[in-house]
Amino acid sequence: ELTRTQRSRQVEPLLKEVIAAAPGDVVLLDNLEILFDTGLEVEPLRLLQVSSRNRTIVASWNGSFRDGTLIYAEPGHPEFIQFKQTEAIVITVGTSANN
């Protein structure tokens, strides 16, 4: 029911509200794909960084980390985005052929 501009403006306050309501010092976030929706016109990594100023945020990132660059989606995909020189601690979790 919100206009595109109204939706964009509501993302950060809503994310902060979710984080504030979480118990404990560490907040685990998963299923963040909605933040990459181009219609929202937000910068997902910036939102997470701003939200982590007062709490530790552990976010599941459905993308990759290569050569110091955090990547979401593949080139050519509408939601493709990359962040170079991120101020984040990245832990890569992969699968092996034996699993």
Image (cartoon, helix red, strand yellow):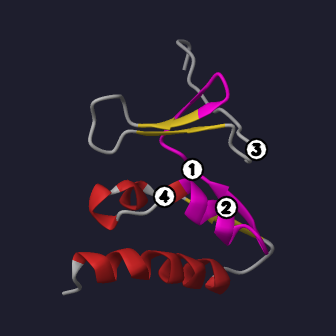
Q: Where is residue 45 shown, x and y percent of the image?
A: 57, 54
Task: Give neighbour class at mark 4: few <14, some 14-19, many 20+ (Cα, 10 Å).
Answer: some
Label 4: state its secondary structure. Answer: loop
According to the image, label 2 marks what residue? 49
- Sequence-first disc among 2 and 3: 2
According to the image, label 4 marks what residue? 43
Label 1: state its secondary structure. Answer: loop
In this image, 40 relative to 24: left or right? Answer: left
In this image, 75 relative to 57: left or right? Answer: left
Pointer 2 with pointer 3, Cβ within 8 A: no
- Sequence-first disc among 2 and 4: 4
Q: Quadrant of the N terminus?
A: bottom left
- Sequence-first disc among 4 and 3: 4
In three-dimensional space, the C-alpha distance between marks 2 and 3, rounded to whole angstroms, equals 11 Å
Q: Quadrant of the C terminus?
A: top right
Q: Which mark is residue 39?
A: none
Q: Quadrant of residue 27?
A: bottom right
According to the image, label 1 marks what residue? 60
Q: Relative to 95, say whether 38 is above or below.
A: below
